[in-house]
């Protein structure tokens, strides 16, 4: 007898994290999406019913995801109410060479987020860097979006000021912030650009749109965005009153090294 998948840790986690992000104002209306790579054990909890499967063809699926199962939010889902509509607002897909098969959830003929291909490319990219990678999380964290109105859309322009104003910044995101200049959402182009940035940074900002974090857990991603968003708020709130830029390059490097980390060197050049 299969266990009840809807009560499993990945499902309860996605219900909690989406509601938490909505409460912070990071996922207004139907904004944002989340996906989670299931382990074999977690997949074993699903009562698979081949009569309910739906196949969708998408070209060029990443080879290292074929055969993997992904828990992902639905297109148009509202994070305020997702926790009360789990069977319709989330689902599980199995990645195939030709696209994907819906194996659980997405009831009422729902489907994965319009950013689905972006999620597959992002998972694929991070797995090449970190075999323990599991989660991709996208939202519209308010202070991070505001940065697009005052900063040039480059990794250095976003990262260095935030390292300077919050000492913990280089501890949490020592690999810097990857920045993708504005592109049309939901396209293969923005997916490819994001996946490329994820090879060097665990967090990527879409200029004037939102942010995407990768990590080993929901909390790993949430904490990453939370820290960048807080640093962005400090930076923006002090623009007109600041008497100093904050930490020097050497202070940032020294702190990182004291923790056994290395601040991404190209950010200082």
Image (cartoon, helix red, strand yellow):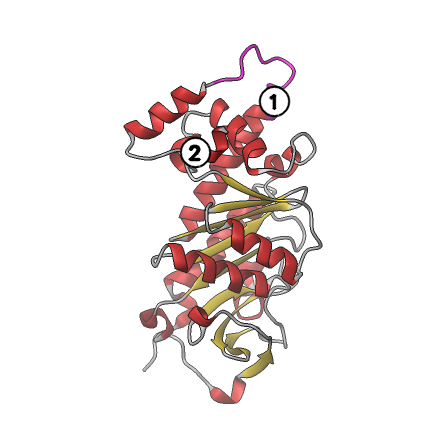
Q: Is residue 69 visible?
A: no
Q: Position of residue 215 (x, y in %)?
A: 42, 51
In the image shown, does 96 or 157 lie closer to the viewer?
A: 157
Q: Secondary structure at mark 2?
A: helix
Residue at mark 2: 265
Which residue is denoted by mark 1 in the rendering?
Answer: 237
Left of 6 or right of it: where is 153? Answer: right
User: How far separated are the C-alphas under marks 1 and 2?
Assistant: 27 Å
* 34 over 254 or under it: above or below: below
53 and 89: which one is in front?
Answer: 53
Label 1 or label 2, whichever lies nearer to me, is 2
Does 211 sit above or below residue 253?
below
Q: Can residue 59 be seen from the camera position used here?
A: yes
Q: Which residues are magenta?
A: 236-246
First along the sequence among labels 1 and 2: 1
**Marks 1,2: beta carbons within 8 A:** no
Q: Is residue 248 above or below residue 229?
A: above
Q: Nearer the viewer, residue 135 or 201?
A: 201
Name the element at disc 1. helix
At x 55% / y 80%, what residue is drawn? Answer: 98
């Amino acid at each position: 007898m299969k266990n009840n998948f809807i009560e499993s840790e990945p499902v309860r986690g996605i219900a909690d994290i989406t509601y938490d992000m909505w409460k912070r104002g990071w996922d207004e209306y139907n904004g944002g999406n989340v996906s989670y790579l299931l382990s074999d054990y977690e997949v074993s909890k699903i009562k698979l019913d081949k009569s309910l499967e739906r196949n969708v063809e998408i070209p060029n699926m990443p080879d290292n995801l074929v055969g993997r199962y992904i828990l992902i939010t639905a297109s148009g889902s509202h994070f305020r109410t997702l926790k009360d509509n789990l069977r319709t607002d989330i689902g599980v897909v199995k990645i195939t060479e030709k696209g994907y098969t819906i194996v659980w959830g997405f009831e009422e003929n729902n489907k994965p987020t319009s950013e689905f291909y972006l999620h597959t490319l992002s998972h694929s990219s991070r797995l090449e860097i970190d075999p323990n990678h599991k989660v991709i999380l996208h939202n519209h964290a308010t202070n991070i979006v505001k940065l697009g109105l005052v900063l040039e859309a480059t990794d250095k322009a976003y990262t260095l000021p935030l390292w300077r104003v919050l000492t913990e910044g280089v501890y949490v995101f020592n690999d810097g912030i990857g920045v993708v200049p504005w592109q049309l959402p939901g396209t293969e182009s923005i997916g490819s650009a994001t996946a490329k940035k994820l090879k060097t940074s665990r967090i990527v900002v879409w200029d004037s749109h939102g942010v995407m974090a990768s990590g080993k857990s929901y909390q790993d991603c949430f904490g990453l965005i939370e820290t960048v968003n807080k640093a962005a708020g400090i930076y923006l709130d002090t623009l007109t009153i600041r008497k100093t830029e904050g930490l020097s390059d050497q202070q940032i490097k020294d702190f990182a090294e004291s923790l056994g980390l290395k601040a991404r060197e190209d950010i200082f050049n």
